[in-house]
Structure formats: structure tokens, C-alpha cells
Image: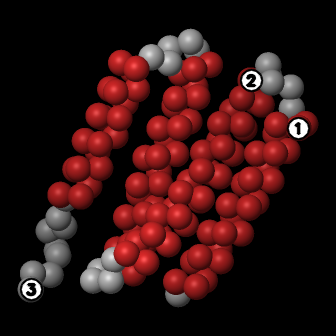
């Protein structure tokens, strides 16, 4: 898949998820179990697409030395962590557990996961 096709597909799916999020907010009762599940899922997917596209565009502008595939995978992976952080923060707020200690622990956990992925090298990687 070319970069142009990836960007168009990601943009289309992000807009579809945004429309789904707006539909969930408008049509569902906020006390329903399924409404809460659909809200958090559609919010996560909308944030994931938007953050992935923004991260990719920033990487395309400011980094010139790496492959486009690595830029796409890095921006998508970091968009997952960002979206997960926002959704978990909102859920903790819903449960009245939104405190700075919990947020710091969550950020440390996500940072350690990202450090693991950044330092992970495949056994079959080509050494130059």
C-alpha cells in the first residue's frame, strides 16, 4: 500500500469513527452499559486515527532519514498509547479515581512499554 493510499484510508476511517462517536453521543442514553462501551470504543478509534495522522505528518516534515514504513509504524504505535491514555483518564474520572498518582503511574507504565518497543530488535533484522 502506498503512503497516499494509507493516508486516505486512515483519514476516511477516522472521519467514520468521528461520525460514530457523534451518533453515540446524540442517540444513546448515557446510563446504558452499551452506550458507555460504544462511546469509549468510538472515542478511542477517533483519537487513534487523528493522533496517528498528526504524528505521521510531523514525522514526514521533520525527519528525513528514516523509511516511511518506520514512520508509519512508530506514529501508529504512539497514537495507540496516547489514545489509551486519554480513554483511561476519562474512565478513571467516571469512577472518581482520577488523581495525579494514578495518572503518573499510568504514564510511567505506558512510557516503559514504549521504551520496550523502541529498544526491541528482531532476531532476523539485517545488520549493516
* Total labels drawn: 3
Location of mark 1 (residue)? 26
Of callouts 3 and 2, the N-terminal one:
2
Residue 64, placed above or below residue 111: below
- Tell me the residue at 33%/77% (across/down): 63
Q: Is residue 60 left or right of residue 13?
A: left
Which residue is disc 3 drawn over?
128
Q: Residues within 10 Å of mark 1 (few under 14, many from 20)?
A: few
Q: Nearer the viewer, residue 121 or 82?
A: 82
> Please, is residue 35 above or below residue 69 in the view?
above
How many C-alpha atoms fall within 10 Å of the one at disc 2: few (<14), some, or many (≥20)? few
Taking 43 as reference, is 35 left or right?
right
Label 3 secondary element? loop
Residue 52: image location, x then y, percent = 51, 62
The residue at which mark 2 appears reads as 33
Residue at the far top in the pictured view: 96
Q: Residue at x 34, y 27 (%)?
A: 104
* Residue 119 horizontal/vertical position (percent): 17, 57
Quadrant of the image occupied by residue 69: bottom left
Amino acid at each position: 500500500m502506498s503512503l497516499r493510499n494509507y493516508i486516505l484510508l486512515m483519514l476516511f476511517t477516522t472521519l467514520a469513527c468521528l461520525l460514530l462517536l457523534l451518533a453515540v453521543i446524540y442517540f444513546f442514553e448515557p446510563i446504558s452499559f452499551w452506550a458507555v462501551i460504544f462511546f469509549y470504543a468510538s472515542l478511542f478509534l477517533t483519537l487513534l486515527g487523528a493522533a496517528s495522522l498528526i504524528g505521521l505528518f510531523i514525522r514526514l516534515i521533520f525527519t528525513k532519514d528514516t523509511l516511511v514504513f518506520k514512520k508509519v509504524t512508530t506514529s501508529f504505535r504512539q497514537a495507540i498509547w496516547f489514545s489509551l491514555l486519554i480513554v483511561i483518564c476519562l474512565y478513571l474520572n467516571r469512577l472518581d479515581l482520577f488523581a495525579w498518582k494514578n495518572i503518573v503511574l499510568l504514564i510511567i507504565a505506558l512510557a516503559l512499554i514504549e521504551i520496550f518497543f523502541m529498544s526491541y530488535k528482531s532476531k532476523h533484522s539485517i545488520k549493516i
